[in-house]
Image (spheres, helix red, strand yellow):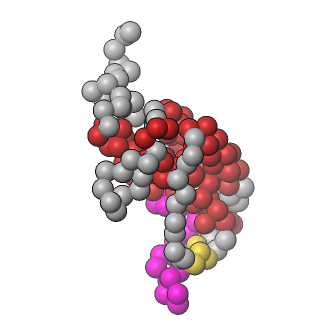
Amino acid sequence: MHPAAEPLMMELQTEGQTTRRVLERVPQDKFTWRPHGRSFSMGELALHTAQVPAALGRLLTDDVFLVTPFTQAEAKTSAEVLQAHDDSMIFAQDFLKGLTVERANTIWKLRAGDKDVMAAPRLNLVRALMFNHWYHHRGQLLVYLRLLDIPVPSVYGPTADENPFLAN
């Protein structure tokens, strides 16, 4: 593993635990709920959030990724979401472990038709694509929970529902 991937691995593991706590709060009976007609349903968003680390690890595996239309399946059960998360974490960890210095520094490109939309060393995109994308969707999921009056777990600090800094 590339030495610079070690702190990314630690972040993946820590954030993976946090993301799992959020996903555990998503009620199966609300999977079809959506806050707006153009928004993902809660089941689509939960499954997407669960799958992001592996999906983006797969994107970064090849040197060029061609943009294609994207559709997101809706989860059928809570168990499916949690299993997707656990599988995604394994894939993402294996991806990071396999990053040699050469692979990490190789330029990766996102291409739409004939146009390069993005190009950067693969290692740089672990944060820019994989982690930031993941955190963005986890944040959306937290808003969904709040809108449905479901207790919001602590992510980086206290929420109105949970304060890890207070003794129980």
> In the displayed image of the protein, which residue is found farthest to the bottom?
114
Q: Is residue 128 left or right of residue 167?
A: right
The percent position of residue 101, horizontal first and vertical second, equals 67, 61
Chain part drawn in magenta: 110-129
* Residue 126 against residue 112 in the figure, above or below: above
- Residue 80 lies in what quarter of the image? top right
Q: How many marks?
A: 0
Report which quarter residue 12 is drawn in: top right
Residue under the image location 35 percent in, 43 percent down: 144
| Looking at the image, residue 116 lies above or below residue 52 | below
Horizontal and vertical percent position of residue 59: 60, 66
Q: Residue at x 53, y 36 (%)?
A: 20
Q: Is residue 115 magenta?
A: yes
x and y percent of residue 54 in the render? 62, 54
Front in this rendered view, residue 29 or 163: 29
- Residue 160, how many percent across, how many down? 27, 27
Magenta run includes residue 124: yes
Q: Quadrant of the C terminus?
A: top left
| 21 and 106: which is toward the camera | 21
Farthest residue, direction top? 168
Can residue 120 be seen here? The reply is yes
